[in-house]
Image (tube, rainbow, N blue to C red):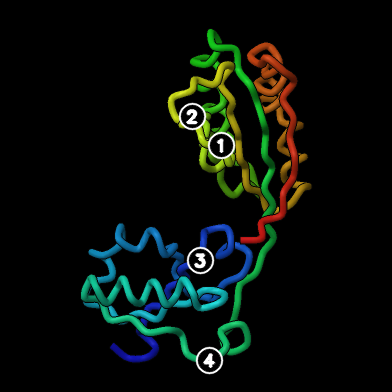
Amino acid sequence: MSEKEKLIIDVRTREEYVQDHIKGALNIPVHDLEFSLDFLKGKTVSVYCNSGVRAKLAKKWLKKWHINADLLAGDWDADYPRVTRGIISAINYLEIHPDKETTFQGRIKQLCQKTNEIDGFLGSKLLKISGISGVGSYLSADLTKVDVTPHKYIIITYWKDKHSHDKSHKLKFFKDIYEKLPSYSTRMPYEEFYDILK
């Protein structure tokens, strides 16, 4: 395989990749490499990240899996054509009535599916609390089995910019679902914007 045919793999997170990456590079986050082994087998790849830490880890793991990889030579920031774009995250925090969870989950999944069609939308996640980490909260007790009621949810959406996000909230299907959120909630939901640093 010639230098031109070599695959360039960006092993950073998907969000880092969206913000700035080498033109033509594929994004396979370092912890997802094992899911792409069939695709990578027999290919020569160069890997890169920001600091080199994840790229070195990727090279080590790929070697273990019998895939030839090297670290991208030179300063990728300066030596390769790049693609850059904006990305922000809008995060909603909710606490849902136990008897309304099934309806809430169905409506939010519906909303996320419909949102895929909106220009400027870059993806979403719906998270539900599954326990409390005692060790992560610097507590000695084992809190993994504690049932948190009402259940907390986090909706994370990714957008090209705040304008795309705000425009989406004016669409009829969006308003129809969002106007019902307070009736599912034990407290008023709120949303915050976050810049993605890593």
Q: At x 54% / y 11%, what residue is drawn? A: 98
Q: Is mark 3 on a helix, strand or loop?
A: loop
Pair 4/1: label in front? 1
The kind of residue tagged 2 is Leu
Q: What element carries label 4?
A: loop
Disc on the earlier residue, 4 or 2: 4
**At which x and y percent is residue 145?**
43, 25
- Residue 143: which disc? 2
Q: At x 72% / y 42%, what residue is drawn? A: 165
The kind of residue tagged 3 is Arg
**At which x and y percent is residue 119?**
65, 47
Q: At x 33% / y 75%, what residue is drawn? A: 60
Residue occupied by mark 4:
74
Mark 1 neighbour class, 10 Å CA radius: few under 14, some 14 to 19, many 20 or more: few
Disc on the earlier residue, 3 or 4: 3
Which quadrant is home to the C terminus? bottom right
Pair 1/2: label in front? 1
Q: Is 142 in front, or is 82?
A: 142
Residue occupied by mark 1:
139
Disc on the earlier residue, 1 or 3: 3
Q: Is residue 160 above or below residue 62?
A: above
Dot 1 and dot 2 residues touching (CB under 8 Å):
yes
Q: How far apart are marks 4 and 1 (CA)?
A: 46 Å
**At which x and y percent is residue 130?**
47, 29
Pair 4/2: label in front? 2
The kind of residue tagged 4 is Gly
Pair 3/2: label in front? 2
Name, please, the residue furthest toward the front.
140
The kind of residue tagged 1 is Leu
Q: How far apart are marks 4 and 2 (CA)?
A: 48 Å
Residue occupied by mark 3:
12
